Image (cartoon, rainbow, N blue to C red):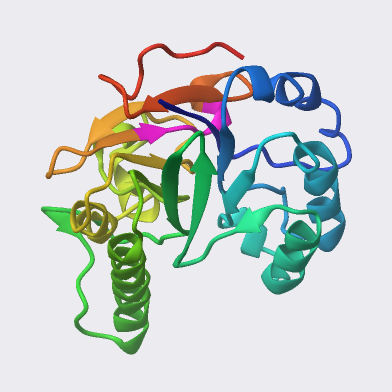
Amino acid sequence: MIRIAAVGDVHVDKDVVGRYRPALEQLPDRADALLVAGDLTRHGTVDEAKCFATEFGGLAVPVVVVLGNHDHQSDQEQQVTEVLTDSGITVLECSTTVLEIRGHRLGIAGAKGFGGGFAGACASNFGEREMKQFVGTTEEISARLGEALRSVRCDALVALTHYSPVPDTLVGEPLEIYAFLGCYQLGHAVDSAPTALALHGHAHHGSERGRTPGGVPVRNVAHPVIKQAYNVYQLLSESVDAPLVPA
């Protein structure tokens, strides 16, 4: 059994430091790794990244993250990534990591993702250059995520994104903004590999549970949705949710 703690959209700045730490200190008794699904900071500054590293770094379990749209706001995503990496936090962007956990190999492929919408209500790679660039970005990121997922050799495989791969976990958000919260191409990427669980954030008013067309469980772990420091999911057991460990 592998236990994964997950949260997203923590938006750390100076005023948030100390809020999550008491629960995070309990992680070794509750989970084997912590995955954070983007929007680590409020405005994507180096100072905020240092605050996130203070709050989420130096834990007794591995911490693996992807960046979110907020982490790109100040165009300092490279510097933010360097701060996190220097603090021992693994940052994924169309890349992978494998964790050895009690004789099992947990594979994680991560990417921020992008928008575009879902079947019947999505943007197409056609028309103006700006639209083609928008959808082209979505297609490129999704293709690279799929390649990353298919490259991992492990016992349990997790996809970690900020944007959603399915519309199920967006229920509660206005339909008009679904196209800015995720895209079907990410779902196709998840389904292209033997993925056991897909985690994302971004949709603060969405729903926790969904599935890809291929049947992969999807969980929206945005903090405003799960309403606690993290949820814990089990892999290599009968259910990814049995039991959920409160935090």
Does residue 120 sit above or below 2 in this rendering?
below
Q: Is residue 74 visible?
A: no
Image location of residue 74, percent across then percent down: 72, 67
- Residue 6 vertical placement versus 150 (above, below): above
Residue located at (76% from left, 36% from top): 59
Q: Residue at x 56, y 11 (%)?
A: 246
State the image quarter where residue 58 is shown.
top right
Give the magenta-colored segment's residue range: 219-224
The quadrant holding residue 206 is: top left
Image height check: is 212 above or below 31?
below
Confirm whether the magenta stretch covers residue 221: yes
Q: Is residue 5 magenta?
A: no
User: Which quadrant of the figure has residue 193?
Assistant: bottom left
- Measured as percent of width and height from the top left, residue 159 is found at 38, 49
Q: Nearer the viewer, residue 6 or 153?
A: 153
Q: Quadrant of the N terminus?
A: top left
Kindly identify the residue that appears in the image at 33 percent across and 44 percent down.
155
Residue appearing at x 28%, y 39% in the figure: 196
x%, y% of residue 11? 69, 42
Quadrant of the snapshot with the C terminus: top right
Furthest-bottom residue in view? 129
The percent coordinates of residue 61 (x first, y second) are: 67, 36
Q: Residue reaching furthest front?
A: 103
Question: Can residue 194 be seen here?
Answer: yes
Compared across the picture, whether 114 is left or right of 97 comes to left
Instruction: Tell how many labels.
Output: 0
Q: Nearer the viewer, residue 28 or 110?
A: 28
Say whether residue 134 is left or right of residue 226. Answer: left
Pick the front one: 127 or 67: 67
Between 202 and 189, the one nearer to me in the picture = 189
Give the left or right position of residue 105, taking residue 178 as reference. right
